[in-house]
Image (spheres, rainbow, N blue to C red):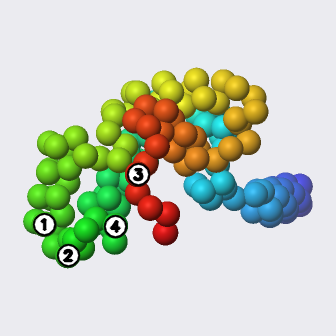
Amino acid sequence: MAARWWWAALAAAGVLGGHASAALEPGRHWSVRDGNDWRALGPEAQAAYTDGFLAGAGFMQAAGPGAGTMTVDSAGLRDTMTALYRSGRFRLPYGANVYVSRLNDYYWWENHRPLPIWYAFWEVNTSLIGPTTEPAR
């Protein structure tokens, strides 16, 4: 009889625990992650986040509508990415270590922490290369 109550109590605890964990706020969307989220990442996670951000930005530059020509095949995309790299024409031209270091400096200031990470990338990149000359859309 005691074993039955033990299993019932264990099952009830599992149901309540599962319900409580499901009620937690899911991960925030990348577009609203801010300096507090950045500062919570460890060095390896910051480097991985930055590598992913740079890869996505480079991909969109090479394959996106603003690329001048829409790349529709993998060979063309690869050629465009290689040409952008070799000519130093990526809009975010520096390595991940440069951006990680600058983002850490940027978010050192408490008034910058509420700003989204994507915006911090733009601010840091602008400070490195100057303002963009592309027209607004």
Q: Quadrant of the N terminus?
A: bottom right
Q: CA distance from mark 1 to mark 3?
A: 26 Å
Looking at the image, do the residues carrying marks 1 and 2 touch, with CB atoms under 8 Å apart?
yes
What is the three-letter code of the residue carrying label 4?
A: Gly
Which residue, given by chain and number where applicable, does mark 1 sit on? 76
Q: Position of residue 76 (x, y in %)?
A: 13, 66
Say which element carries label 1.
Answer: helix
Q: Which residue is mark 3?
A: 133
Labels 1, 4: front one? 4
Q: Give the mark nearest the N terminus, 4 or 2.
A: 4
Residue highlighted by disc 2 = 72
Q: Is residue 134 above or below residue 118?
A: below
Q: Of marks 1 and 3, which one's residue comes earlier in the chain?
A: 1
The three-letter amino acid code for the residue at tag 3 is: Thr
Q: Where does residue 57 sit, x and y in percent of width and height? A: 38, 53
Q: Would you name the residue on which mark 4 appears?
A: 66
Please state if 78 lies on the left or on the right of 7 as rendered: left
Q: CA distance from mark 1 to mark 2?
A: 7 Å
Is 31 on the left or on the right of 126, as rendered?
right
Looking at the rendered image, the disc whose residue lies closer to the viewer, 4 or 3, is 3
Question: On the image, which quarter does residue 80 sit in?
Answer: bottom left
